[in-house]
Amino acid sequence: MLSLKTRSLIGFLALVVVVQIIGGASTSLSVHDWYQTLAKPSWNPPAWVFGPVWTTLYLMIALSGWLAYHAMKTAGIQHPLQTNEFKAYFAQIAANCMWSVVFFAAKFPVGGFILIIFMIGAIAANIKLFYKHNLLSALLLVPYLLWVLYASTLNGAIVIFNLL
């Protein structure tokens, strides 16, 4: 029988794998055709960068959630997944998942930009809330926030270059 720590780690990893699969499938719908036709800023990285960066960030997101969950359990919080900390966690993950659907599958950069601004707020809130329980769980989300801030500049530039 697997321990609670092992089962919960598998659960957090499975969650981010599902998000990565949905995001990848949505991206593949237009990254090789529609996206190639868009004017992009000079700071747009080469395509090969996105896979390794997102894989690393998703692993960090999963570990962050897992560490916060166990810190809260250790502190005697009965249902950590029902707290504001995890409402922010699940909100930022849901927004992350939906961004690829909106931007790539729906080919709607303006909607993607609105969603990414929400995601920035949710990630920042998540960092602040996790910090109260486990410093490492909060710090693991900082590179993710920085990457999403960078991605928001790309998304915003694409909106400006192509739609305005």
Image (cartoon, rainbow, N blue to C red):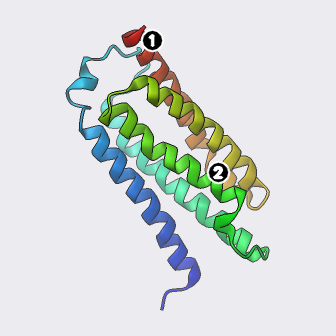
Where does the image place residue 65, in percent across and percent down from the top left?
Answer: 60, 61
Q: Sequence order check: which comes first, mark 2 or mark 1?
A: 2
Residue with the mark numbered 2: 88
Q: In which quarter of the image is residue 38?
A: top left
Where is 5 relative to 97, above or below?
Answer: below
Tell me the kind of residue under disc 1.
Ile
Tell me the kind of residue under disc 2.
Ala
Q: Residue furthest top?
A: 164
Where is 112 relative to 54, above or below?
Answer: above
Tell me if 53 is positioned left or right of 63 in this view.
Answer: left
Q: Residue 160 carries which label?
A: 1
Residue beneath the point at 53% across and 35% down: 147
Tell me if 103 is positioned left or right of 67 in this view.
Answer: left
| Helix, strand or loop status at disc 2 | helix
Where does the image place residue 80, in percent across and percent down from the top left?
Answer: 68, 68
Q: Quarter of the image containing the C terminus?
A: top left
Question: Which of these two is toward me, 57 or 112?
Answer: 112
Residue beneath the point at 41% across and 50% down: 55
Residue beneath the point at 74% across and 76% down: 74
CB atoms at circles 2 and 1 under 8 Å apart? Answer: no
Q: Which mark is residue 121?
A: none
